[in-house]
Image (cartoon, rainbow, N blue to C red):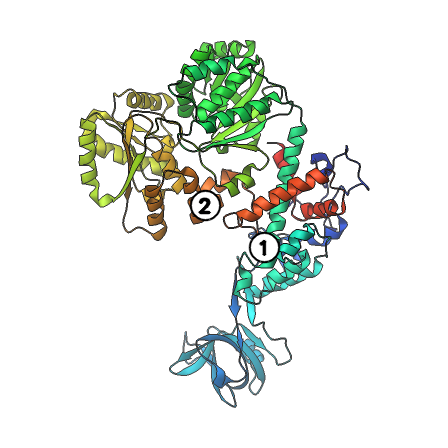
Amino acid sequence: MAGPATGADGQKPEAADLGATGLHDPAAAAPRPPPKGRPPILFPLFAGADTLPGVGPKAAEALESLAITRPRDLLFHLPAAGIARRHVAKLSDLRPPEIATVTVRVVRHHPPSGRGRPWRVLCSDDSGDLTLVFFHARQPWIESQLPVGATRVVSGKAELFDGLAQMVHPDHILTPSDPLPPEFEPVYPLAGSLTQRTVSRAVGAAIERAPPLPEWIEPSLLAQRLWPGWLEAVRAAHEPEGMDQLSARAPARERLAYDELLAHQMTLALVRRDRRRSAGRVTQGDGRLRERMLAALPWPPTGAQTRAVAEITADMASPQRMNRLLQGDVGSGKTLVAALALAAAAEAGGQGVLMAPTEILARQHLAGLQPLAEAAGLRIAVLTGRDKGEARETLLADLAAGRIDLLIGTHAVFQPGVEFADLRLAVIDEQHRFGVAQRLELAQKGLRPDMLVMTATPIPRSLALAQFGDMDLSVLDEKPPGRQPITTTALPDSRMEQVVARLDAALAQGARAYWVCPLVEESESVDLTAAEERFRQLRASFGERVRLVHGQMPPDARDAAMADFAQGRAQLLVATTVIEVGVNVPEATIMVIERAESFGLAQLHQLRGRVGRGSGASSCLLLYHEPLSDSGRRRLQILRETEDGFRIAEEDLMMRGAGDVIGTAQSGLPRFRVADLERQSELLALARQDARLLLEQDPALASKRGLAIRNLMWLLEQDRAIALMAAG
C-alpha cells in the first residue's frame, strides 16, 4: 500500500496526530506524554525504496507495482516459494534431475555451432563431467565468468541429456571464496524487470535498517505460541530453512500475521470506543406501535428476531449513538426487525429512513412495510430518483414538517433539499453497496441519528470481525415459520430442451418461475446481451407469458415487468442478477439459473432465496455447461446439500478467498500482506479480544505495552485507517 510522500528523514510532512483520533485519551492520566508523530526509530524504514542498494529507477518502478515504495514494505513482502539445493561433494554424487550445488573445473568452451544453438561449457572434477548450457550468451561475459582452467561453484538444475549430465543456465556461478547459496533459497513474487537477486538484496538491506522494537504482544501469548520477537520473526520469515517455514503456521509468519491483525483490531476498537463516546440521543419508545405491528402478523416472530429487536432498541435507548450490523440469511426476516426498530423511533416522536441500493428494492420494501405501517398508524412514503415535480415537492415538505414517519428511499435521499423534522434512525439495506462517504451524508441528515446497517449476505465470522469489527453485531440465524424448503437439482445445459418442456408443463398448471441468465463477465452490457437472447428464445416458446428485467431498462418498464410478474399477468421472468436481492414474489416457486458454475456460492444462494417464500413447494434448477471444473462441481454440490447460508458462506470463503466473497473493490476489507483471513480466523478473534482488553486496562495507551503498540500502529500505518474509519 503506497503511502504519502515522506521527507528526507522518512517522516511524513504532516504526520497525523494519533491522539486526535482516539489513540490518546486526554481524560486518562498518562505517566508520560505519548509520542504524537511517527517515532524517529522508524524513520529509516519510511525512506524511499530507491535508497536501498541495487534499486535504481527501473527496479523502483517495478517494486511500486507490487505496492512496495519503502524499506518497510519489503519487510512484509515474504517469499512465496523456495528452492531446495543439495550441496554435492563431487559430480559422481549427482542424482539428476535435482537442484544441486557443486564445485567444478572449467575444461573447454564450445561456441554455438549455428544460429539458435546454445553455447556449451564442459566442466569436470576427478569423478565425472558436467556440461553447462547457455542460450543467447555473450562471448565476453561467458568467458569472463567461466575462464578455462578456473575452479567454479555452480548451482542449478542438473538433468540428463543423451545420458550426460548438464545444467542449463545455472542460477549461481561463484568462485570458491564466495559464500555458498543456501541449501534452501527463498523465492519472492516478482514484477516487471525485477530479479530474485535484486529483491533478495533489497530485502536484506531493509532488514538491516529495521530496529529492534519494544514487544507489543502479551508475554504469556508469546510463550504459549512459541513466537519469536518481531525482528527475529522478520529475519526468520525471509530466511526459511525448509518448505515448512513457508507455511502460514510457521511461528515467524504466524507472529507477523498476528501483528497485522492486532494493529487492525486496535484500530477498530479505537473507532468503536470513540463512536460510543460520541453523544447520541435517547430514543425510548413505549412499545405501543410495535405491539400493533406484531398483532398484525400471521405468526409470531422468531427468537432470533425478538433478540435482535431487543438489542437494537436497547442501543437506541442509550445516550450513545448506535452503530449496529444486522446480519441475516435469505428469508430470515430482517424487514420485520427493521420495521419494529423504525416503529420505536416513531414512538419516541422521531422519524426513520430505510435506504435501499436500487429502486426495485426500495419499492419492494415499501410493499413489505406498508401493511405493518398501516397497522401501527404510521405515515410511510418512498423517495427515488424518479420522483419529480409537484409530487416530490409535496413529499419533501411533508418530510420536513414531520408529517411522514417513515421514509424509504434510494440514493435520492442524499440530495440537497431532503430534510427531516427529527431523524432518529437510519437503516441501510445491503450496506456494502453504499460507500463510507454516503453513510456519513445520511448520518448528517439528522441530529446524530442511530445507524443500523443490514446485509442479506451471510458473512463468515472472520470477515465480519475484519470488516465490521467497529460495529455491534446482531445475527438472525432462524427462519420464520412458513418458509418452504427448496429442492435443488443440477443438470447439464445439453438437456435444455427437456428443461423447457418441464417448465412448459409447470406454467400450464399456473406456476411462476424466474430464469436467471449467466454472468458472462463483470459487464452489464455483455450480461444484458445474454439475457436478451434467452428472452427471445423463451418468448418464442411461451409467448406473452414471459417478461425481461435488467439493470439498464428504464425504471418504468422495469417496474411494469415486475408488476406483471408479481400480479400473475406474466408467469416467467427472465432476468440478470438484478433480482439477486430483495425481490419478493411469494407465488414464484421455480428458479432456473443458467451457467450456474459461473456464479459464486453466496450469489447462487441469494438467487435461490427468491423462491420458497410462499406456501407452494419450490425448486431450484442449476444448469451448468460441461466440462465442469473441480471448484464448479464442488459449488453446485454444496448448494444441493444445504440451505444454511452461513455454512455456504464459510465454504465460499475457503474456495474463493476473502476479496471475492464480498467483492474486493467494495468490501471495505483490509489488505493484509501476511495475514490470511481464510485460514487464520482464530488469530483474528484472539487479536480482537486482546485489543479490547488492552484498551480497557490502558485507555491512553501510555503503559509500556501501550507505547509499544503505538510503534506497531505507526509501523503498519493504522493512522490512516483510523482517519478513514472515523468517517464511517
Q: Secondary structure at mark 1?
A: helix
The amino acid beneath tag 2 is: Leu
Residue in the foreground of this view, choosing between 724 and 554: 724
Residue in the foreground of this view, choosing between 519 and 354: 354
How far across and down, in percent of the image, does residue 519 sit? 35, 40
Furthest toward the right, the residue is: 32
Question: Which residue is labeled 2 in the image?
Answer: 653
Residue in the foreground of this view, choosing between 549 and 673: 673
- In the displayed structure, would residue 179 be above or below residue 18? below
Q: Earlier in the sequence, mark 2 or mark 1?
A: 1
How far across and down, in percent of the image, does residue 24 sit? 74, 37
Question: Which residue is labeled 1 in the image?
Answer: 254
Q: Secondary structure at mark 2?
A: helix
Residue plotted at (54% across, 61% down): 246
Q: CA distance from mark 2 to mark 1?
A: 20 Å
Left or right: 490, with 210 as reference point:
left
The amino acid beneath tag 1 is: Glu
Residue 455 visible in the shown view = yes
